[in-house]
Amino acid sequence: MIEGLPALTHAVVDCNAVVHNLKVVRQYTSNSKILAVIKANAYGHGLVRIANALQDADALAVARVKEGIELRLAGITNRIVVLQGFLDRDEMDAHRKFDLDPVIYGFHQLRLLATCPYLEELSLWLKLDTGMNRLGFKQEDWRAVLEWLNTHQGQWAELTWMTHLANADDLEDSTTQKQIDLFRSLTADRNEHDSIANSAGILGWKQSHSDWVRPGLMLFGVSPFAGRQGYEFGLKPVMTLRSKLVSIKQLHQGDAVGYGGDWVCNKPICLGVVAIGYGDGYPRAAQSGTLVAVNGQVVPVIGRVSMDMLTVDLSTCPHAQEGDEVELWGSQCAIEQLAKSASTIPYTLLCGITRRVGVMEIPAVEAEQPVQLAAEFS
């Protein structure tokens, strides 16, 4: 990008909203410590940027070792947990060098730890698979895990038990309660701390709250529940995706719009062309009728989304001009609604912003007013 030349399409990342959402998490789980999950480049918001805004979190979580190293090299001093832990000795050594907490989920890791000369320096997060069937020790592994723990009792710096909820975003699904019950039964006689709740658990399953909670999506102002939006829980969107109108023209009844001519005018309309497409991360699958906001006025997308552009019906926005600002998602157009229109999930949209999209950061300034918490979700 030429210095001084602004990007037509840009994401505004409001770090004040991150700070606000962290406070909301604390009000939902006042007795728990917060392990703030900022993996995948902080869900597309910028890893170091968001880590700096979350200095009041009790710890940060990333997926991979390199993400943890990046944070340390950027000067982040918070406790950092690596959710995929280490695969080999080199990665285990990196945990020690950069003061990272590994998640332990497999016997290959326990074998490495058994010969580790600095085990007493490591804080371990031991993961149990209670039904996700991804990472973690299954119930049939329990006896062997206990044998390892008894053999190495007291040799680690700290131990925390954890599991991951597979279906917590569905409040009618009994899987979550079964997972919680299994986890509690396996760890009932243990004296260490534990962690169960993700964002959906925090908002919808009080019984999953424990010593640590692990908010991810909700930190970015997005609801983990289908059909619900972040503001309903007192959350604020952190990212606003914006572009501009680059062309306006009049179309006649019967004119077809875009590739394939799928959308045909049933009356004369004013058509606007917006400088954003799937090459920027806007979903190609977004259906005609998906809403965007032009100067605060919502208008529908029409026709297929192309690589660099999408088209909108400006008939209800007659004063629009080339250069006017368009919000694709944010406070006016909820990302949850766009995800539904595109048959995807908000995670995919946030993580899918491409490198040609500019980023404008609003630095965090500590707010003096108290956070207003939405009514409890049940």
Image (cartoon, rainbow, N blue to C red):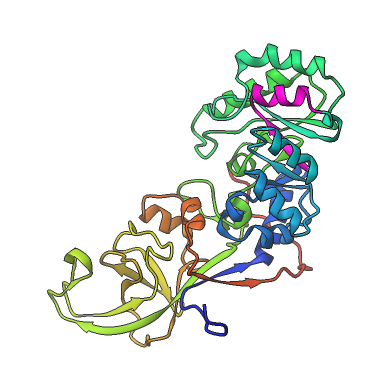
Vertical arrangement, residue 205 with respect to residue 362, above or below: above
Q: Quadrant of residue 310?
A: bottom left
For the question of whether residue 118 can be seen, the reply is: yes
Q: Residue at x 36, y 54 (%)?
A: 342
Q: Is residue 52 left or right of residue 119?
A: left
Residue 371 makes an appearance in the image: no
Given residues 119 and 212, the one toward you in this image is 119
Quick check: 130 above or below 258? above
Report the residue at 38% width, 86% height from top: 322
Seen in the picture, residue 150 relative to 249 is either above or below; the reply is: above
Residue 256 picture location, percent across and down: 17, 71
Q: Position of residue 198 (x, y in %)?
A: 62, 41
> Of 89 and 349, which appears nearest the observer?
89
Which of these two is toward me, 354 or 93? Answer: 93
Q: Is residue 288 left or right of residue 32?
A: left
Q: Residue furthest front?
A: 90
Residue range in magenta is 100-116
Q: Is residue 256 covered in magenta?
A: no
Question: Can you name the residue that lies furthest to the left here?
Answer: 254
Horizontally, residue 368 falls left or right of residue 218, namely right
Question: Relative to residue 206, is residue 150 drawn left or right?
Answer: right
Q: Is residue 109 magenta?
A: yes
At a point 43% along the width and 57% down the height, the residue shown is: 337
Quarter of the image containing the C terminus?
top right
Spot occupied by residue 177 in the image (x, y as percentages of width and height): 58, 27
User: Total number of numbered labels?
Assistant: 0
Q: x, y percentage for residue 171?
A: 52, 36
Q: Out of 348 and 76, give the one closest to the viewer.
A: 76
Residue 73, quarter of picture = bottom right
